[in-house]
Amino acid sequence: MAARFISKCSKVGRSLVGGVGNNSSNLWSTHRETICSNFLFQQQRTFIQMRTVLKVVDNSGAKKVMCIQALKGRKGARLGDTIVASVKEALPNGKVKKGKVVYGVVVRAAMQKGRVDGSEVKFDDNAVVLVDKQGQPIGTRVFGPVPHELRKKKHVKILTLAQHIA
């Protein structure tokens, strides 16, 4: 559907350049072009920033966290970066309770990340593994795929707990 919608947007752009037709059709074309550009802008993926809700993919007891701040003084966090987050949803008998401020490592991000071999890795969701202040994971299992770029960021313990390394 997205590819089909993009092709319609390109046709609208061509009809505006041609300039054939009355004013009402040009107005309609301009309106459609605005809708197309808004749709494409919403599809653009950005990095993890303040107030981003992330899925927790370990068995620490938390289900969803909200990013408070990306560490290292950056505006946002990408794969392998550490963030400070607040727990928004948690299991009643877990190690982490709702409202607690925790550290987390971003293990999946919807934003593309280029690799040295020229390929790109991109995930469907934003996910995090909760860690303590020393960087050791709180949980004992990590669910879902984890990129091997975490090895460069010195998160080897998360890679050993992961089920699948992408």
Image: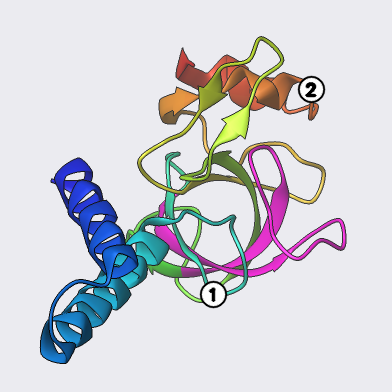
- For disc 1, the neighbor class at 10 Å (few under 14, some 14 to 19, many from 20) is few
Magenta region includes residue 75: yes
Residue 114: where, in percent of width, then height? 63, 27
Q: Is residue 147 above or below residue 93?
A: above
**Residue corresponding to mark 2:** 152
Region in magenta: 61-87
Residue 7: where, in percent of width, then height? 21, 47
Image point (72%, 49%), residue name? 82
Residue 24: where, in percent of width, then height? 12, 90
Drawn side of residue 166 relative to residue 42, left or right: right
Q: Quadrant of residue 155?
A: top right
Q: Residue furthest right?
A: 73
Image point (63%, 15%), residue name? 118
Drawn side of residue 79 relative to residue 143, left or right: right
**Residue corresponding to mark 1:** 51
State the CA–CA distance, disc 2 to disc 1. 27 Å
| Residue 90 seen in render | no
Residue 122: where, in percent of width, then height? 47, 33
All told, the count of numbered labels is 2
Front residue of 57 and 146: 146
